[in-house]
Image (cartoon, grey):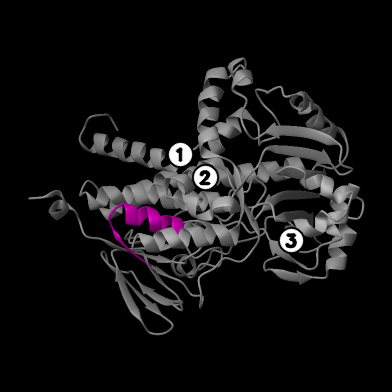
Amino acid sequence: MDQNSQQKSLHIGLVGAGIGGLAAAIAIRLAGAEVTVLEAASELGEIGAGIQMTPNVSRLLIKWGIADIIGDNLVEVEEFNLRQQDGTKVGYTKMVPDMKKDLGHPYGTTLLSLNLQLMRDRWWVVHRAHLHSGLVEVAQSLGVKLLINSRVNSLDYSRKGPVTVTTEARNRHVFDLLIGSDGVNSVVRRTLFPDVRPTPPSTNSAYRAIVPYSRILKDPIAKTLIEKPTMEVWLSEKAYIITYPISGCKDLNLVLSHHTDNLVYNVEDVAVEDLRKQFEGYDLKIKRVIDMIPETQRWPLLVTALESWSSPEKNVVLMGDAAHSMVNHMAQGAATAMEDGAFIGRCIAEVVQNRLTLTQAVEIYEKERMPKARAKQHISFLNGAIWHLPAGPKQEARDGAMKEEMSGKKLSRSPNLYSDPRMLEQVYGYDAEQHADEAVRTFLQRREGVIDT
């Protein structure tokens, strides 16, 4: 009997063709399962602006060939600068690691190994549309079925075994496993957990905008911001601005975090004059760029908290924002969704090879990924608190603790989480596929009595 005849035939369905859903589709297809993605929209695409592809997921873009497709539209960031509201630099991270300095660091061996990995995996920024297009191209080349105009109307998952999905167009699909990758307003999550509602944890929300380089270059003051591809952050009480280049350094992406008088649950149209007034007192360089913003929207920062991600029969499971939406202060929302997809793909591979059941694969995924997602939610809260500090002793202590980084010295701990060694290891050095392989191996060893439970 050949190897293929020993493999289990699986048809996995995903609801939602966003970044996380497409990453999962690619990983599961590579695992050997048939994959169908149901997308509600009438065409494939991604709204929004820029997105950070940090090393924990840039490795997936490289491995899956997506980086080659996106090409020059991926921008590698050279440095990260934290500034006070007036532009005074208070924090610094060199995005390309310095190996010689790492050797002399208290965490030298760990940092050297980690930074060798980070150099391979890159720190990219990209327009969401370019990332999404690359994911679509790879998914389709692998044989993933992407069905548009397929808004899900109902699920029948009450019995152990296959799940039946009915769309608004009355089309029926039957899957061995259904994955809800349909974002913060997930139909799948509402079906499983109707009492759960993603909630803004505070009055914090964010403006998003894009300004063309061609316009910035005409301003003698503003153009100094784009002399090289850097990520810049201006910090102030209850607000900050972050900028970085996208689209092959043709556009500058801006995210302007701020607080409002009320909780924000949905994307809101905002008069651009209100945005400009809110950031009136900032560094002239960034203020000149803000004055170039033609229009903007206010985006909510919603957090989803669940005790389980799956149906009782483990034939429906959630991922990405459907399971664990988070505030944006560490730029890990989409990255965490991609990690989910890569992880569950490796678990599905073991089902295809008849080493796990689908139920066991889902249980391993939940057990291992839920704590990781919660940790990302907490770290994102933490960085938001650090970046939103009011003027005073705490802000002075934060800036003082980062002072030595300005001269290139690496610290054992830093309030600049983009260079803190523990954050580098926990967040940016994380390998979802390796984690999945280790978790499966441990499960199999325990089942076979090789190690104690």
Under circle 1, the secondary element is: loop
Does residue 306 appear anywhere in the picture?
Answer: no
Indicate the amino acid at tag 2. Ser
Q: Position of residue 265 (x, y in %)?
A: 67, 66
Q: Label 2 belongs to which residue?
A: 58
User: Which sits earlier in the primary sequence, circle 3 or circle 2?
Assistant: 2
* The disc label shown at residue 431, or none: 1
- Tell me the kind of residue under disc 1: Asp
Residue 56 shown in magenta? no
Res. 308 mark: none
Q: Which of the two residues, 193 or 45, is positioned nearer the viewer here?
A: 45
Q: What stretch is highlighted in magenta?
A: 22-36
How many angstroms separate mark 3 from mark 2 (CA)? 24 Å
**Nearer to the camera, 159 or 411:** 411
C-beta proximity under 8 Å, tags 1 and 2: no
Q: Do the residues labelled 3 and 2 touch (CB within 8 Å)?
A: no
Viewer-closest of 262 and 205: 205
Q: Is residue 32 magenta?
A: yes
Q: Name the residue under label 3.
A: 209
Callout 2 crowding tier (Cα within 10 Å): few <14, some 14–19, many ≥20:
many
Q: Mark 3: which amino acid?
A: Ala
Res 286 visible: yes
Outermost residue to the bottom: 169
Q: Distance between the residues labelled 1 and 3?
A: 31 Å
Local secondary structure at mark 3: strand
Label 1 vs label 2: CA separation? 11 Å
Vertical side of 368 occupied by 204: above or below: below
Query: Which circle, 1 or 3, is nearer the viewer?
Result: 3
Residue 243 locus on image (x, y percent): 74, 50
Residue in view at x 83 percent, y 67 percent: 272
| Up/down of 426 relative to 322, above or below | above
